[in-house]
């Protein structure tokens, strides 16, 4: 293949199907199908939170767990579950952070 400078600019077009058209792109890779599944967090079968796999922001679900005994005192504890595209930050002991790729 040789390239000849004709002095004109050609804008390539991803959707061009005519191979004779100068804007046709040769050897372009296939575009993968991207699904947007909904992920559901449950506690004992009850929905706590949902988000899509292509969410544009972090999603935090606060899952309340049963009371525990600390010494002679019963206290309610909470576990925070975060789904994010970024690295973990902040939080408390026992929190759960899931990092995923968008």
Image (tube, rainbow, N blue to C red):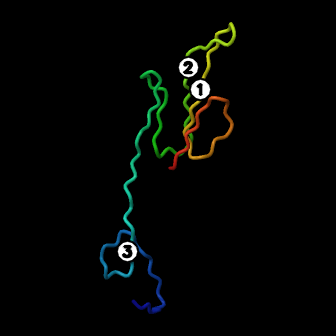
Give the left or right position of residue 48, taking residue 69 as reference.
left
Residue 79's spot in the image, x, y percent?
59, 26
**Mark 1 touching mark 2, by CB under 8 A?**
yes
Residue 42's spot in the image, x, y percent?
46, 27
Farthest residue in the top direction? 72
Relative vertical location of residue 52 with respect to residue 74 in this rendering, above or below: below
Q: Earlier in the sequence, mark 1 or mark 3?
A: 3
**Mark 3 highlights which residue?**
27
Q: CA distance from mark 1 to mark 3?
A: 50 Å
**Mark 2 highlights which residue?**
65
Helix, strand or loop under label 2:
strand
Image depth: mark 2 or mark 3 in front: 2
Q: CA distance from mark 2 to mark 3?
A: 54 Å
Image depth: mark 1 or mark 3 in front: 1
Image disc number at residue 48: none
Quadrant of residue 97 within the rendered picture:
top right
Q: Earlier in the sequence, mark 2 or mark 3?
A: 3
Quadrant of residue 61 within the rendered picture:
top right
Quadrant in which the N terminus appears: bottom left
Give the left or right position of residue 24, taking residue 54 as reference.
left
**Mark 1 highlights which residue?**
79
Q: Residues within 10 Å of mark 2 (few under 14, many from 20)?
A: few
Relative vertical location of residue 102 with respect to residue 2 in this rendering, above or below: above
Relative vertical location of residue 72 with respect to residue 51 in this rendering, above or below: above
Quadrant of residue 75 within the rendered picture:
top right
């Amino acid at each position: 293949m040789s390239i000849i400078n004709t002095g004109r600019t050609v804008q390539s077009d991803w959707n061009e199907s005519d191979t004779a058209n100068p804007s046709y792109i040769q050897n372009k890779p296939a575009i993968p199908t991207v699904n947007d599944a909904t992920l559901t967090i449950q506690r004992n079968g009850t929905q706590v939170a949902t988000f899509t796999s292509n969410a544009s922001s972090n999603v935090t679900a606060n899952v309340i767990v049963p009371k525990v005994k600390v010494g002679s005192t019963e206290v309610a504890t909470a576990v925070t579950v975060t789904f994010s595209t970024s690295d973990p930050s902040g939080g408390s002991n026992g929190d759960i952070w899931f990092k995923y790729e968008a």
